Amino acid sequence: EFTSDYNIPALQQSADSTLVGRNLEVVPPALVIPLVQGSHVEEGSKGATVLLDQVRDNETLDKTIWNSLIGYLEEQGISVENFSPEKGELITGWMNVVTSSTEEDDDSWFDWSSDEDEVAGKGRYKFDVELKPHGRTAQLSVALLDYEHGDKSVEDLNAMEKRRDEVMVLNRVISHYEYLNQLETNRRIAQI
């Protein structure tokens, strides 16, 4: 008896027939890495989203997230075009996207630097923070708004490329948030 679990579906008429061989990008899916204590990713979530639980009680969770995000953007020299905590959204200025100089380089291809020699493109992002009604959990999401690389724009990116960019940005922000949490924990331990 044979199973049909692994049958390859028929090609739809709307499919791009040029995506064959080397033209077909085969990459692992971009994954949100919930590094922060008490954070998690919702099962089946399609967007670049992470759920964060309140760890510190000295300020509200949304304020902690916004302070961390804005601090990170300032640290990286990225402008904030629009910030509306009432709406729960922040829109960044342009961020430079660079490619790695070597294939073996295990650093991410996405970098916040502004070295004009290496810039492959640039993007603008929208961050959304949605506080759950009980106030102890918040959802942080990232969406790519604009992209420029030569004559390529955000409309020219496929869904996988767009998600990869969004997840990469979110993972950097999560990493910074966790770093700040560790600093605060170490500061409290030092006071004891």
Image (cartoon, grey):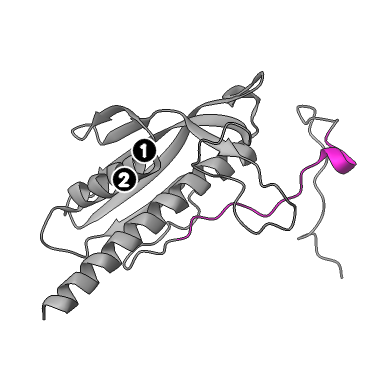
> Which residues fall within the magenta stretch?
19-33
| Residue ID at (77%, 43%) | 25
Given residues 92 and 139, the one toward you in this image is 92
Q: Position of residue 118 (x, y in %)?
A: 63, 36
User: Amino acid type of disc 1?
Assistant: Phe
Q: Where residue 92 appears, x then y in whole percent?
A: 38, 31
How packed mark 2 is, by other alpha carbons closer than 10 Å (few <14, some 14-19, many 20 or more), is some
Work out whether 103 lies above or below 88. Answer: below
Residue at the (23%, 73%) spot, across then down: 186
* The magenta stretch spans residue 24: yes
| Left or right relative to 182: residue 42 | right
> Which type of secondary structure does the marked residue at label 1 adopt?
strand
Q: Is residue 164 above or below residue 151?
A: below
In front: 100, or 66? 100
Q: Which residue is mark 2?
A: 69
As drawn, the label of residue 127 is: 1
Q: What main secondary structure does the magenta stretch of the protein show?
A: loop
Tag 1 near tag 2, CB within 8 Å? yes
Figure label count: 2
In this rendering, would 184 be left or right of 98?
left
